[in-house]
Amino acid sequence: MRHLKAGRKFGRTSAHRKALFRNLVGALIQRERISTTLAKAKELRGKVEKTITLGKRGTLHARRQAFRLVPAKDAVQKVFGPLAERYANRPGGYTRIIRIGHRKGDDAPMAFIELVDREGDDSSKVKAETKKETKATAKPKVAEKKKAEPKAKDVADKKKPASKKEKAEEDKPEEKEEK
């Protein structure tokens, strides 16, 4: 049993796992949104949150600790600069995980992991835009069908009358005019 054994191994050696997460933390800090497997995203969340908290401290010791978690110098500068200012009043919860389905090749569950309140677009705006797009694309199709249906009915009505009485009425006026 794995009681009190925290963390996932991912089938890698400890050095490989450490390098993997150092690179993922650096990529997430620089890009602010990355796509990875759900298990890696869940494991990555704690490491990124710890790094941002170090950035909020702003001390030299915290900067040196951050370099242990993030290999890129520019990523550490971003943590101690804009990200520390952005999350100064937030007591934690700097990341969000959004599931995006399964990978085509091996059916692994995939997810976006992104920084909350990131620059550019908010997820709420993205969700609202996608809803607007789906509604906008759906309505014209429905409207086209509705417009097309009456035309089809008009054509059908012209081809054949609805009842025998209408046939008789149509035939009678023609006969009277001929006489």
Image (cartoon, grey):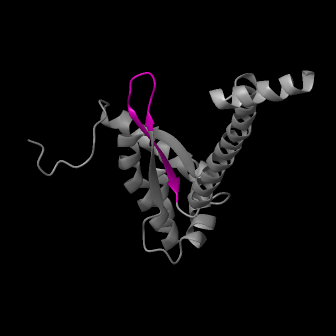
Q: Taking 131 as reference, is 53 above or below it? A: below
Q: x, y percentage for residue 141?
A: 68, 39
Q: x, y percentage for residue 179?
A: 91, 22
Q: Residue at x 56, y 49 (%)?
A: 33
Q: x, y percentage for residue 13?
A: 31, 32
- Nearest the eye: 133 or 106: 133
Q: Residue at x 37, y 56 (%)?
A: 46
Q: Residue furthest right?
A: 178
**Left or right of 57 in this view: 152:** right
- Nearest the eye: 122 or 90: 122
- Nearest the eye: 147 or 130: 147
Q: Taking 49 as reference, is 133 above or below it? A: above
- Tell me where residue 171 sits by quadrant: top right
Q: Is residue 123 magenta?
A: no
Q: Residue furthest bottom?
A: 89
Q: Residue at x 59, y 70 (%)?
A: 86
- Quick check: can you spot residue 161? yes
Which part of the image, by quadrant, shows the N terminus? top left
- Tell me where residue 166 sits by quadrant: top right
Q: What is the span of residues highlighted in magenta in the rendered image?
A: 101-115
Characterize the magenta stretch by its predominant secondary structure: strand
